[in-house]
Image: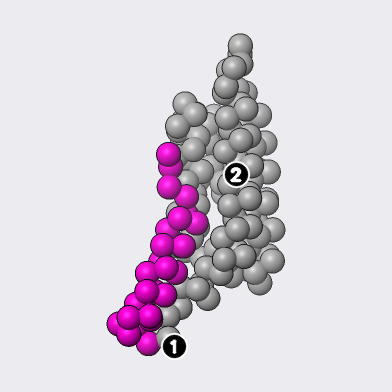
Amino acid sequence: MIDRPTFVWRADVAREALDVATGALAEEDAVSSRLWPEAMSRATDVVLDGFEADVASLVERRWEPATDTGILEVVERTIRALNAVNDRFDGAAFETDERELLCAYVDRVLETAGIEPDDLARRNGISSGDITGPWRDW
């Protein structure tokens, strides 16, 4: 199983809550729950659930390999949905750290399905190392 970025965010929120509860951290210094509110994590998980299902449908029980067009449509749909999540949170849901985690997650899901993101990018004129770039607003 691939750890989702939301797992990391929720773990940080829980750690800070424990630190506040034990007195190791002042409540005003606890920022994780403001950076990653549960509503944002849930909305992100809905998108990632769809992405995982879509990627699985590209490669499971198929006689022919997935096409680049089909794969890129899944990536585009996912990134546009994440753009919408980001917009719902005033364009501040996904900053640098979140972007890096989400992009790495997309790559790992594709790789686990036998799809090499860098090769896919090169074949389609996308910068290697950033299969999400053409559609990502964050």
**Occupied quadrant, residue 137:** bottom right
**Quadrant, the C terminus:** bottom right
Q: Is mark 1 on a helix, strand or loop?
A: helix
Can you give x and y, in whole percent of width and height, for residue 95 in the image? 51, 66
Magenta portion: prevailing SS class: helix
* Circle number at residue 81: none
Viewer-closest of 116 and 20: 20
Is residue 27 left or right of 70 when viewed as pictured? left
Relative vertical location of residue 7 with respect to residue 126 in this rendering, above or below: below
Which amino acid, by three-letter code, is at mark 2? Asp
Comparing 129 with 66, the one in front is 66
Instruction: Determine whether 125 is above or below 65 in the image.
Output: below
Q: Is mark 2 on a helix, strand or loop?
A: helix
Three-letter code, disc 1: Glu
- 115 versus 45 height, above or below: above
Task: Tell me the residue at 56%/69% (across/down).
Answer: 37
Q: Mark 1 points at which residue?
A: 28
Badge 2 is on which residue? 49
Question: Residue sitting at 57 percent across and 30 percent down?
Answer: 56
Residue 68 found in image quarter = top right
Range shown magenta: 1-26
Question: Residue at 51% across / 43% down in the picture?
Answer: 106
Q: Do the residues labelled 2 and 1 touch (CB within 8 Å)?
A: no
Q: Which of marks 2 and 1 is nearer the N terminus?
A: 1
